[in-house]
Each structure stands twice: as structure tokens, then as C-alpha cells.
Amino acid sequence: MEEVKTTPKSNLSIRNKSLTNQLYATIIFLCFLPFISPAISLFTGLLFSLFGIKHDSIHRYTSKILQLSIILMGFGMSLSEVITASKTGFVVTAFSVFAVMIMGVLMGKLFKVEKKITLLIATGTAICGGSAIAAVAPIIQSKSYQSSFALIVVFVLNAAALFIFPFVGRKLGMSQELFGNWAAIAIHDTSSVVGAGAEYGDKALQVATTVKLIRALWIIPLSMVIAFTQKKERGNCIRFPWFVLFFVMAIFFANYFPGLQTSYEHFNWLGKRGMVVALFLIGSNITLDEIKKSGSRCFFLGIALWMFTAIGSLLFLMR
């Protein structure tokens, strides 16, 4: 029987692989703890990428984790709250979604940003930030660096919104209801909308949360539209986003079988934590070369589109 010889180089490679597996397992475990936010998760992934710490195979599951997380989060959406929301909130939200998407595409061409990054930033700005980007990314088959850039833009602007919006609202003497509607439309992620609303007042928080639920539901029709407009290069086949259908089924199931509310809360929590894991994997799978492909133009696009949304929605609400 032949003896298998190992060289110091191969031993080092095995040890490095083992260490990488342990690091990834540790971070994924930490992603399920409450103090690890989506922004921290993505930033940690970027650090892994920067230092060349990359897992051999786990990134192939990123898209599946994203889709499953979206489905699980559907169990946490209340149809009753959405249905009883104000008609004004619905109309303004519908108008803003279409206006932001159209303006986003036009601005993307103006700033010469890649088409897929433009779609992701526009979707995240128009609907609900990271969740919308996560829902659309697998539909358009975006690359890791494209999703990552869109998410970075959204997270940075979200952090700024927590300080800017309450300050502007008080300076302009906005009512609680007006501020709640404005925050729900012009701030990307739900967490930042809730944070800004809570900072402004109880009524603002209630309005902002309700209108935000309406806005989040636009993931469904917009995902369908994007799916039918994005065709494969070969065969012109349409990739139907089946996970969106399951997302809708989860919402209706939770609505018609309220007795399982405790389980729905667990599913929703698991979906949110799964999203954090996916963001870490997205961040750790990009390279410096991929980052250079986009440059600062993504931020210019994100900021310009955000300002258009914030100013435009405020003028519409104050008319």
C-alpha cells in the first residue's frame, strides 16, 4: 500500500481551510444574535473579503438563503393592518414607487451605473431597502458585488436618515401624521422608519409603521414586473420568481390561521436573521476588482435618488 505524502504547503492549506470554516461558522452563529445588525453583518463580510478569507463552497447557497428568508418574513406581515391603513398612504406610496423606479432608471443612465445595480438601488429606494434588494437580486441574477454595492448605499443612507429626518421634521413644524407618512415613504428600511418615527412621537410611529407595511407589499407586484421584463439571453425564457408566490402564501396563511401566531413570530425572526446571514455571505464574496467596476457613481445615484424621493414626497404630502 502506497503511503500518501503530505508537504508542509499542503498541511498549511488544510489548516487554513479549517480555520476559514471555523470563522465562517462562528460569524454565522453570531448573525442569529440580536446585537448583530444587517449593516454589521455586511461590513464583517466585506472585511473577510478584504483580508482574503473566503469559503470554498458556502456562497452557492446565498441566493437560496435570501429567498427562504423573504418567505419566512411573510409570516410577520399583518394584512389587517395593511387593509385598514389610510387611503392617502396607499395612494402616495403607489405614486412614489412608480416615480422612484422611473427616475432611478433615468438617473442610472445619467450616472452610467450598471443596469442591475441601478435596478437594485431604485428598488431599495422605492420600497423597503435591504428587503426589496434581497427579493429582487435573485430575480435579476445580480452578482455579489452588485448586490453588495446597492446594500451599502441603502445602509449608509438609512443611518443618516435616523438623524436627518426628525431634525428636518421639527424645523419645518411637521405634524405627527405628516412626518409618519413622509418617513415611511422616504426612508428605506423598516428599522430606520420605526426608529425615526419613534424619535418624533407615538402618533408618527403608528402612522409610519402602518404606511410602511403598505409600501413593503409592493415587493410582490414589482418583483413580478421585473421578472417578466428580465429575460434570459438564451431562449428568451422568463424566470418566474416562485419564492415571491410562497411569500404571498405565507402572508395569507398567517392571516387566515391566527391561532399559530407564536410560530409565525418565530418564522419571522428566523427570516430576519437569515437575511443577516445572507448579507454576510454577500459581503464576503466580493473582490476589490469587482468593487472597482462600480466606483463612487453608485453612491451618487443613491444619494440623488434618495433626495428626489425625500423632497418629492414631502412636497406631495404638503400640497
Image: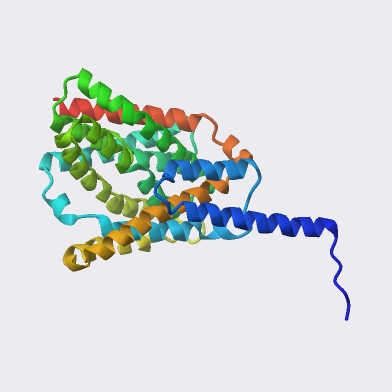
Give the farthest residue toward the bottom: 1
Q: Quarter holding the C terminus?
A: top left
Please name whichever residue, 208 or 67, is drawn nearer the observer in this view of the structure.
208
Taking the spot 34% from the left edge, 38% from the top edge, the residue there is 125
Give the x, y percent position of residue 288. 62, 39
The relative height of residue 249 versus residue 209 in the rendered view (above or below) is below
Q: Is residue 246 left or right of residue 47?
A: left
Give the x, y percent position of residue 92. 18, 37
Asked whether residue 141 is in view, the answer is: no
Q: How many marks?
A: 0
Please name whichever residue, 173 or 211, is drawn nearer the observer in this view of the structure.
173
The quadrant where residue 156 appears: top left
Give the x, y percent position of residue 303. 40, 28
The relative height of residue 81 versus residue 199 in the rendered view (above or below) is below
The quadrant where residue 177 appears: top left
Q: Quarter holding the N terminus?
A: bottom right
Taking the spot 38% from the left edge, 27% from the top edge, the residue there is 304
What colour scheme governs how the chains and residues are painted in the rendered image of this protein?
A: rainbow
Q: Is residue 176 left or right of residue 18?
A: left
Give the farthest residue toward the right: 2
The relative height of residue 94 versus residue 78 in the rendered view (above or below) is above
Give the x, y percent position of residue 159. 38, 32
Please name whichever residue, 261 or 185, is drawn nearer the observer in this view of the structure.
261
The relative height of residue 124 versus residue 83 in the rendered view (above or below) is above
Asked whether residue 86 is in view, the answer is: yes
Give the farthest residue toward the top: 171
The quadrant where residue 39 appears: top left
Q: Is residue 224 left or right of residue 81?
A: right
